[in-house]
Image: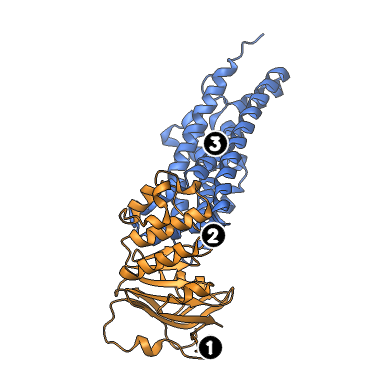
Chain colours: A blue, B orange
Amino acid sequence: MYAMEPRTHVFVRSFIISLSATLIAFSTGAPLGFLIGLKEFRLKPVIVSILNGLMGIPTVVRGLLLYLMFSRYGPLGFLGLLYTPTAIIIGEALLVFPIVSSLSLSLVERNKEVRELIQMIGLRGHQAYSMLIRELRVPLIASFFTAFSRAITELGIALIVGGNIEGYTRTITTAIALYTSMGLIDESIKLGLSLLFLIFFLSALARVLEARYYAEGRRDTV
Amino acid sequence: MRRGEGIRYKRGERILKGVSLLIHRRSVVAVIGPNGSGKSTLGMVMAGLWRPHKGFVEADGEDPLGKVYVAFQDGRLLDLSVKEYLELVGEIDLLPRLGVNKVLDKKCKRLSLGRKKRVHLQAAFSSRHPYVVLDEPESGIDSLRDVKLTIEELRRRKGVLLITHEPSLMRLADKVFRLFNGKLQKYEEDSEGKDVIREGDTLSDTVYRGAVFRGFRAISGTGLP
């Protein structure tokens, strides 16, 4: 029988790709969300609805669009990124970017009290931002887990721009898709279950962190 | 001194409809009023945290942010130790009565509401802010006497806006105003201890008495919003 790539390799590769994508999206999306959340301007509702709308685009459509961009005669074809892990990282970063910005935006808006307190003390600019991030670190970490879960469970982008190349761009989800269609149900189930465990674990962790943060917050406002 | 004049603050409906208030340094001005009358709103506006729909607020001729310490009614504090918090807002100059020395190394978030409000009173006293808004300082604190003595201490160095329901705290104030229907009214007790409210008697006359104000004030226009 055909020798498959070991499961752990697929798992580790998926993990690295999705983690990189989440890190990129987080380091750009969270500051953007904070910025939008902190400022009041007329186009704010428009930007918020654009961010929300972006979240709704199906991953296969995103994959298709990126394929057109990265394919040899596409506008970014000269980069030679199609069917590389980098292409998946870019695609997944674009996928979770609006999620991260929306989450951090609503985080800032939900925690108006903290902002007022920081303003009242008289902290400005850089100092005020770092204090705000420090105060909101727990729910921020929770939103990181949420974004990572979304990235690692995504299929459309990894399949279309990654190409599901064994030993190179095969991820957990593309492997499951392939093995199932090949009739290797046993292997698919094993991968599927491990992915499920990972996601349950991360989402439970995120919920616990958030619940603890807001439970403390509620105690403040008896 | 600080003053607020003719501020209008709108959220849905207008809450403050032309309020003028001037608070000098080393004085205590109390504002009372029914629930929902806008007392806390007035405090937030005076501190520069909520922007008035009309009018302006200033402290010593500048933006009040960072010059007015607000002892929030809900006791909110930062996720720091009490010592770190006090150092962030000013210096550590403890009032023994408030008992904050016992919790200096504790995390603010771990304190009970009463202790948080004690930390706020302490911070109001030792912070670098020249003005203070005390929003119902008596709620959650077990000893009214501690609150009273702290207000007396505050009077010696700061301008205080005291928002309260407690009659015995009201008596500490140099002036008492009642916020009703979005306007400030002078509030006095006659010789028999009966409440006397003079309708329509706002502070504008006081506010315009001097030419240059060093103080905390808020002024609104008179036009329609």
Residue nearest the observer in this picture, A35 or A78: A35
Residue B40 lies, with reference to residue A132, above or below; the image says below
* Discs 2, 3 touching: Cβ within 8 Å: no
**Disc nearer the start of the sequence (2/1):** 2
- Measuring from the top left, give residue A133's x and y in whole percent: 43, 47
Q: Is residue A11 left or right of residue A86?
A: right
Co-location on one chain, circles 2 and 3? no
Q: Nearer the viewer, residue B48 or B106?
A: B106
The three-letter code of the residue at mark 3 reads: Phe
* Residue drawn at (61%, 31%) of the image: A201
In this view, B178 is above or below A188: below
* Chain of the residue on which disc 2 is drawn: B
Q: Residue furthest left?
A: B212
The residue that appears at 26% across and 83% down in the rendered structure is: B212
Rendering coords of residue A36 (x, y %): 46, 57
Q: Nearer the viewer, mark 3 or mark 1?
A: 1
Assign a secondary structure to mark 3. helix
List the residue tagged with mark 2: B140
- Chain at numbered mark 1: B
Q: Which mark is residue A148?
A: 3
At label 1, counting other C-alpha atoms closer than 10 Å, the crowd grade (few under 14, some 14-19, many 20 or more) is few
Query: Which residue has dot 1 on it?
Result: B192
Is residue B5 visible in this depiction of the protein?
no
Classify 10 Å Cα crowding around label 2: few (below 14), some (14-19), many (20 and above): some
Q: Chain of mark 3?
A: A
Task: Name the mark on residue A165.
Answer: none
Q: Amino acid at mark 1?
A: Glu
Hey, what amino acid is under mark 2?
Gly
Residue contact between numbered discs 3 and 1, judged by CB atoms under 8 Å: no
